[in-house]
Image: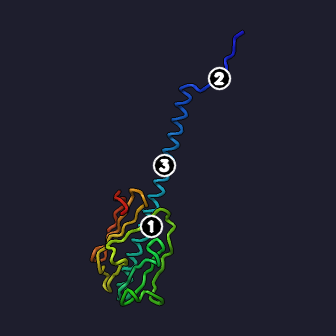
Amino acid sequence: MGVSKKNLGLTLVEILVSITIMSILLVLIVGGINDDASRRVSSLTDLMSSTFTMARAEAIRYRKPVYVIPATSGWGAGWKVCSGDTYEDCIGDNLIRSIPPQSAKGVKTVSFPADKLYIEFSSSGYAVTTKIIKVCIIGGGLENEIKINSAGSLDVIYDTSASCE
């Protein structure tokens, strides 16, 4: 009769197959995380750009300046669209629309120039100052830009792959 051998370990082929399967699963998981982050940034970019377009249309409609201002503590806490003769009039009955805080975890928005943290459209729909709004992943290399030119029109650039500064 034959002597039976006990399997005391794994063969090289078994180890290689296991590593290959784990590598494939890791690539799928990491790829899914990056796609999710990209969708969040794109979604927030689209929401902000549609808000700016709506604000411009309302400025022309009301024939009054319209402002897009961050809520209490920055753009991440939501923002408001309001009309009035000055930025300070953006309270009470002058509110056109309020956008609630966005639950885009890991996403931050940065507005330039920093001396004027709101967007203003004149009664004719022109932007009072040109702006670049950056929407990006905190600590990541994914960034979208919304450029508002002096005519009030928008140019949205997706995935500029720049730093989120």
Q: Amino acid at mark 2?
A: Asn
All told, the count of numbered labels is 3
Q: Determine whether 115 is above or below 17 in the image.
A: below
Q: Depth check: 138 or 33 in front?
A: 138
Name the residue rendered at 32%, 84% in the picture: 122
Q: Residue at x 72, y 9 (%)?
A: 1
Q: Secondary structure at mark 1?
A: helix
Left or right side of 41 for 153: left
Asked which quadrant contains residue 164, the reply is: bottom left
Reading the image, the residue beneath label 3 is: 30
- Assign a secondary structure to mark 2: loop
Q: Earlier in the sequence, mark 1 or mark 2?
A: 2
Mark 2, mark 3: which one is toward the viewer? 2
- Taking the spot 48% from the left edge, 79% from the top edge, the residue there is 98
* Coordinates of residue 89 in the picture (x, y in percent): 41, 89
Residue bearing the label numbered 2: 7
Query: Label 2 vs label 3: CA separation?
Result: 35 Å
In terms of secondary structure, where does tag 3 sit?
Answer: helix
Residue 84: percent from left, percent from top = 39, 89
* Mark with earlier residue (2, 3): 2
Q: Quadrant of residue 162?
A: bottom left
